[in-house]
Each structure stands twice: as structure tokens, then as C-alpha cells.
Amino acid sequence: MPGHDWSKLKCVSIDLFDTIIALDTSDLPRVQWQGKEIPSTAPRVYDEISRFGCTLPFEAFLPILQKNQDDVLAEKEERNIEISATIRFLRLAEKLDIGSDDLERMDIAKRLTKVHMDCIDESSRVIDGTRPLIDEIRDAGVPVVLISNFDHAPAAQKILLRHDLTNSFDHLVISDGVGLRKPHPGIFQEAMNRCDATPEATLHIGDDPIADAWGAARLGLRTIWINRKSKDFPREDHLPERTVLTLREITR
Ligand SMILES: [Mg+2]
């Protein structure tokens, strides 16, 4: 089915990472982790935290950073809540006993967040087909909302600015600001509220089968699942209304 009929919609929401923005991690430093060499912001974070009195060698620092990250992720996934990157790095500073008081630790956490997020920002690339898709939807008079599970809203705004996409969205709904992560109904509801749209008049486009496609369909939204790797849908309920391999398929 080429193209898409936008005419009956009051809101189109679009995911950020791996839907319209990809991270090209080839410029990131490499670290050895669990027998594999992986791209990571950890060396940059380590350089920054070393300036504030962390004397651990990198090999001892990395597992602590990773454990802190895993613990935060588990807490987030348990209830689909967001925990900001700054809080994550604050907890890291506490674990490493860096900083003399809460105020100083918060300042350090903000610096670490900036270092980490600058790496993400610099690695970001616009995925082919993004601009034609957004232009087509907005030309049809339908508001476009960005819905992203991202733990630092300012970095999302910076990435959009870097790629000249700031004005492509009518509203930004970032989990860091809402406190909830997809597939939590609350974050989709927030997007619909911004457009004064019902679920039937809202279409969500995203790459994650659960967070995006299933989460939105469960709430009664219409859905397009970007399934670039041709995977099977992991559930048998609330299937995506439409599945495509690329964004270009939606508009052509
Ligand atoms: Mg995504």
C-alpha cells in the first residue's frame, strides 16, 4: 500500500531514536565489556569524573558505572517511569563518594550528564525519509508530536536543533519531562491532549514493537511499526495496523 491517508487524523506522533534519528557510534571510544569491544561514552564520563577526585582506575570504574546504569534501567522498566540522566549520574557520584555535599554532587552529575549527552548529540544522524514524511503529514494539516523515551529532554531539543528539525514538530513529549515512558498510556495520552485528539484520530509511528506499536495500539491509537530488521511481532494482541521496513514506504 503506497502512501498513507492522513486526512482523518488529528495527531500523528513519532518516536525519536531509531525511527527518525540513528546513533552512529563509530566515533565513540571503544571499551572492553564482558568479553566484547563496544562503543561507549564511559571513557569520556571517566575523564570528567576524574577531575572531581575519582581515583579509581578505569577498569574498576566501568563495572560501577554499568551496575548503576543497569539498576536505574531495571527501576525504569518495572513501572515504565523515567529517571533522568542527571539523577542517574547523581547516584553514581554518591556510590563513588565524589563531591563534598549534595549541592556539589548535583553539580558534578550535571557535568557528567553533559559529557554523556554531548557524545549522543554528536553521534546523531537523521534517518532517510524523515523530512518527506513529516512534511507530508504537516502539509495535510495534521499536527506532528515527537514522543520519545529519553532521559534528558534538553539533549532531545539539541539533537533536533542540530538537524534543523526543531520546527518540524508541533509538540515535544519527552519521557524526561512527563515522568513516564512508553508503553505507559500516560505518555501517549499527553501527546493526544496536546493536540486535543482522540485515540481513533491519532496515529503513532515508531520502531519499538512494544514501547511504540503495542503500547499505542493498546490505547486504541492507530499504528505504523517501523520494522527495519523484518522481525516477528513479539505479541499476539494489539498488532500494528501497518508494518513497514523504511520511512520511505509510508510516503512514496
Ligand atoms: Mg525508538
Image (tube, rainbow, N blue to C red):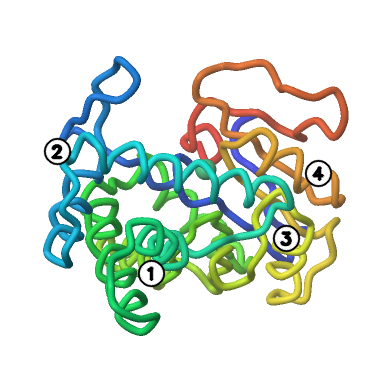
Asked if labels 3 and 1 touch by Cβ distance under 8 angstroms, the answer is: no
For marks 4 and 2, give the CA distance: 37 Å
* Kind of residue indicated by mark 4: Ala
For marks 1 and 3, give the CA distance: 19 Å
The circle on residue 217 is 4
* Kind of residue indicated by mark 2: Asp
- Residue appearing at x 45%, y 48% in the figure: 68
The circle on residue 27 is 2
Asked if labels 2 and 4 touch by Cβ distance under 8 angstroms, the answer is: no
Mark 2 CB lies closer than 8 A to ligand 1: no
- Residue appearing at x 55%, y 54% in the figure: 149
Pointer 3 residue: 188
- Residue appearing at x 74%, y 52% in the figure: 79
Where residue 182 appears, as percent x and y from the top left, is 67, 51
Mark 3 CB lies closer than 8 A to ligand 1: no
Question: Of label 2 and label 3, which has the lower sequence position?
Answer: 2
Look at the picture and state if 203 lies above or below 241: below
89 and 185: which is toward the camera: 89
- Residue 226 located left or right of residue 133: right
Other-residue count near label 1 (Cα within 10 Å), few / some / many at <14 / 14–19 / ≥20: some
For marks 2 and 3, give the CA distance: 34 Å
79 and 166: which is toward the camera: 79
